[in-house]
Amino acid sequence: MEELLTVSGLSKTFHLSKKQQKLEKTTEKVKVAVDDLSFCTYRGEVFGLLGPNGAGKTTTLRMLATLIKPDKGDALIDGSSIVTDPNGVRKKIGFLTSELKLEEFFTPNYLFDFFSELYGVDQAERDERKRILFQKFGVDEFAEVKVANLSTGMKQKVSLIISLVHDPQIIIFDEPTNGLDVITAKVVTDFLQELKAEGKTIIVSTHIFSLIEKICDRVGIIINGKMVLCDTLSHVTAEMPLEDKFFEIYRETAGEIV
Ligand SMILES: Nc1ncnc2c1ncn2[C@@H]1O[C@H](COP(=O)(O)OP(=O)(O)OP(=O)(O)O)[C@@H](O)[C@H]1O
C-alpha cells in the first residue's frame, strides 16, 4: 500500500485572549490544540479522524489544508510538504469545511468558473465537470441564483462542488455532514463513497460514529490533541462496536464522562 499522506509530529498551540479564556473556562494563557500527532493515509482509502468537540480535528485538518502553519512537525501530501511547499499541496487537495462561507453576492455558476480559473482548469474540462456535478447535486436549477438566496443545504452542496473544481486526488472534509438535514447528509455520504470508488483518497473528521462505520477503512481517534488509537476499522471494532470502543478509550485517557 502506498502512503499518500504522512503526518509526523504535528503540533499547534494557540494563545488565548481574555475572551477565549472566559469561553474555555480557563486561566491558562495557551491551549495545546494538536500535540505531536502522527499518522498516515494510504492511497485510495477513506481515513476517519474521530474525536469529541475540541479534540483538535479541525486544527489538524486546517494544517493539512495549509490554512494554518504547524508550530512543529510536518505532513507530506503526495510528496509535497505542508511547511515548505504549501502551493504544491493546495493543487493536490480539495478542502471542505461546514464553516466555509461562500461569497453571498455570486451565483454557483460564477463561483464554479471563478475557482476553476484560479486552479487553471481547462475550459472544456471545467464545463464537463460542472455539468456532471451540478446535475448530481441538483444545483443546475439554482445555477444563476445568488448564494444569499440558497437554502443551507444547497449552500453546502455548492461549497462541496466548489472544493472539487480541480478534481483533486486527495479530499479533506471537516465534519462533512455537520448541520445538514438527513437527505442532504445522505447525498454527501453517498458521494464520498462514489469518490472512493473512483480511487480518491479521503480524510474526514467527524464525531459521528455511524459515518465512520459507513465509509472509513481506517480510523484515528483523537482526544485532547493526541492520537490515542489509529488502526483499521475492522481491528478497532473487532471486540465491540465503535461507539463502545471510543468510550472505553475516552475513559482511559480523559477520565469518567460526566
Ligand atoms: N484560533 C484559535 N484560537 C484559540 N484557540 C483555538 C483556536 N482554534 C481552535 N482553538 C482551540 O483548540 C482546541 C481544538 O479545537 P478544534 O476546533 O481543532 O477541535 P475539534 O476537534 O475540531 O472540535 P469540534 O468538533 O468542536 O469542531 C479547542 O479547545 C479550541 O477551542
Image (cartoon, rainbow, N blue to C red):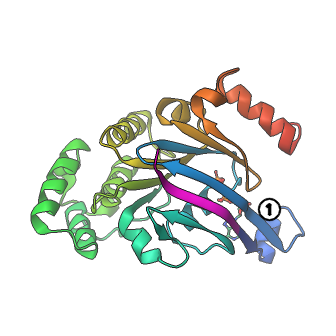
Crowd around label 1: few <14 · some 14–19 · many ≥20 (10 Å)? few
Q: At which x and y percent is residue 66?
A: 51, 71
- Horizontal side of 243 relative to 85 (left or right) equals right
- Ligand 1 within 8 Å of the CB at mark 1: yes
Q: Residue at x 87, y 64 (%)?
A: 26
What are the residue bounds of the magenta stretch?
1-11
User: According to the image, label 1 marks what residue?
Assistant: 24
Tell me, yes or no, if residue 34 can be seen here: yes
- Image side of residue 254 versus residue 2, left or right: right
Ligand 1 visible in quadrant: bottom right
**Residue 25 left/right relative to 77:** right
148, 222: nearer the viewer: 222
Q: Secondary structure at mark 1?
A: loop
Task: Give percent across and percent down for residue 9.
Answer: 69, 63
- Which residue occupies 77% across, 53% down? 224
Instruction: Report the residue that reaches farthest toward the front.
Output: 1
Pick out the residue farthest to the left: 124
Q: Position of residue 153 (x, y in %)?
A: 38, 47
Asked if residue 153 is among those painted magenta in the image, a careful observer would answer no
